Image (tube, rainbow, N blue to C red):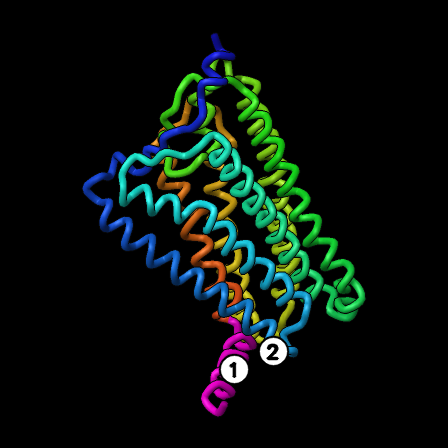
């Protein structure tokens, strides 16, 4: 019977924000605006960094990768979600759902590890400046980025293959995209092993990089405290605190979603938390990491003057 149910499933229906039907127009307007602004901000960062040779350093190399990830990460989820708000319940094929889950996990986990690599880069720059160039060579930076994408690939494949090779006994996904927790609700029989697999993988994909980020910033803050200038300490603390706030929001909401049993799943609350790591942090990242940076702002002004005199 389970096999029959499984083979009969050729697609799913995304319920989207059915609980907030009266707010669909407002949500659509806000989310579309944030999506467009985020795409524009990240595209601007990529163009600026590639156009200005003074920004061809490890830190800006990682920022370019982060911007590329953000654009891809949001584009896997947001267009389908906006379409869902316009037409109501929206169908998605079995293969389409599997691909959406894989790419969401691929880009999301890659970002988790990339943020850890960026924190390590800042740790070396601040705590070991004399050896920074030797440690953060082009080869090392490339390996850190490739490693981030490799971790994303492994996690995406593990979750997607295990989930979609299991028999489904339902078609209605109570979410705005093919997220793991609502899909577990549709699996036939006992899903205990699936839940354990999700939590174990999340410990590796979320908590490990988050702890590396925290460790890096603890070392950075201890070094900052030794800065003799009060103004210098304040500026460094401001930068570190804003980075940590965004990183904590990203990892924290991800942990809330994946590091708990299926029995605690609450669709309305989980959808709002999912908005945090699919919309809010991608919107904040370019503002916090790049557009508040004096070097980036200087490069933007330089490019703007070139365009005016062209």
Element under disc 2:
loop
Q: Of residues 188 and 56, which is closer to you in this image? A: 188
The structure residue drawn at horizontal position 46% and vertical position 29%, both measured from the top left corner, is: 181
207 and 105: which is toward the camera? 105
Badge 1 vs badge 2, beta-carbon distance below 8 Å: yes
Residue 91 in which image quadrant: top left
Query: Where does residue 100 sit, x and y in percent of width and height?
Result: 49, 39
Task: Look at the magenta stretch and give its main secondary structure.
Answer: helix
Q: Crowding near pointer 1: few (<14 within 10 Å), some, many (20+)?
A: some
Q: CA distance from mark 1 to mark 2?
A: 8 Å
Residue 175 position in % (x across, y down): 37, 34
The part of the image, by quadrant, that contains residue 240 is bottom right
Q: Which of disc 2 and disc 1 is earlier in sequence?
A: 2
Residue 213 appears in the rendering: yes
Say which mark, if any, is on residue 86. none
Residue 151 falls left or right of residue 284? right
Depicted 130 relative to depicted 174: above or below: below
The residue lying at 70 percent from left, 51 percent from top is: 146
Disc 1 target residue: 303
Residue range of the region highlighted in magenta in the rendering: 293-310
Q: Position of residue 122 (x, y in %)?
A: 65, 62
Please, what secondary structure does the residue beneath circle 1 have? helix
Q: Which residue is mark 2?
A: 52
- Classed neighbour count for the residue bearing mark 2: other residues with Cα under 10 Å, few (<14), some (14–19), many (≥20): some
Q: Residue at x 27, y 38 (%)?
A: 88
> Of all residues shown, which one is farthest toward the left?
22
Observer-nearest residue: 225 or 29? 29
Image position, residue 50 (x, y; %): 61, 72
- How many numbered marks appear? 2
Instruction: Determine whether 289 is above or below 261 in the image.
Output: below
Q: For the point 44% across and 47% down, which residue is it?
A: 278
């Amino acid at each position: 019977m389970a096999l029959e149910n499984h083979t009969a499933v050729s697609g799913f229906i995304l319920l989207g924000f059915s609980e907030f039907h009266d707010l669909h127009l407002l949500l659509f307007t806000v989310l579309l605006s944030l999506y467009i602004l985020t795409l524009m901000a990240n595209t601007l960062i990529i163009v600026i960094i590639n156009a200005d040779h003074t920004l061809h350093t490890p830190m800006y190399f990682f920022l370019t990768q982060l911007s590329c990830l953000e654009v891809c990460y949001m584009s896997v989820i947001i267009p389908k979600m906006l379409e869902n708000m316009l037409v109501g319940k929206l169908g998605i094929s079995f293969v389409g759902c599997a691909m959406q889950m894989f790419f969401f996990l691929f880009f999301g986990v890659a970002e988790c590890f990339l943020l850890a690599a960026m924190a390590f880069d800042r740790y070396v720059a601040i705590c070991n400046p004399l050896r920074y160039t030797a440690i953060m060579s082009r080869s090392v930076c490339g390996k850190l980025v490739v490693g981030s994408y490799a971790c994303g690939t492994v996690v995406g494949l593990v979750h997607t293959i295990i989930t979609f090779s299991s028999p489904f006994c339902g078609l209605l996904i109570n979410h705005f995209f093919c997220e793991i927790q609502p899909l577990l609700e549709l699996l036939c029989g006992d899903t205990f092993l699936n839940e354990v697999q999700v939590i174990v993988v999340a410990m590796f994909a979320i908590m490990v990089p988050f702890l590396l980020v925290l460790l890096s910033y603890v070392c950075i803050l201890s070094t900052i405290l030794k800065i003799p200038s009060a103004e210098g300490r304040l500026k460094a603390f401001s930068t570190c605190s804003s980075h940590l706030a965004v990183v904590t929001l990203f990892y924290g909401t991800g942990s809330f979603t994946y590091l708990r049993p299926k029995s605690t799943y609450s669709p309305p609350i989980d959808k709002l938390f999912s908005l945090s790591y699919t919309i809010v942090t991608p919107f904040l990242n370019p503002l916090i990491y790049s557009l508040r940076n004096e070097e980036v702002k200087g490069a933007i002004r330089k490019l703007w003057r070139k365009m005016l005199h062209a």
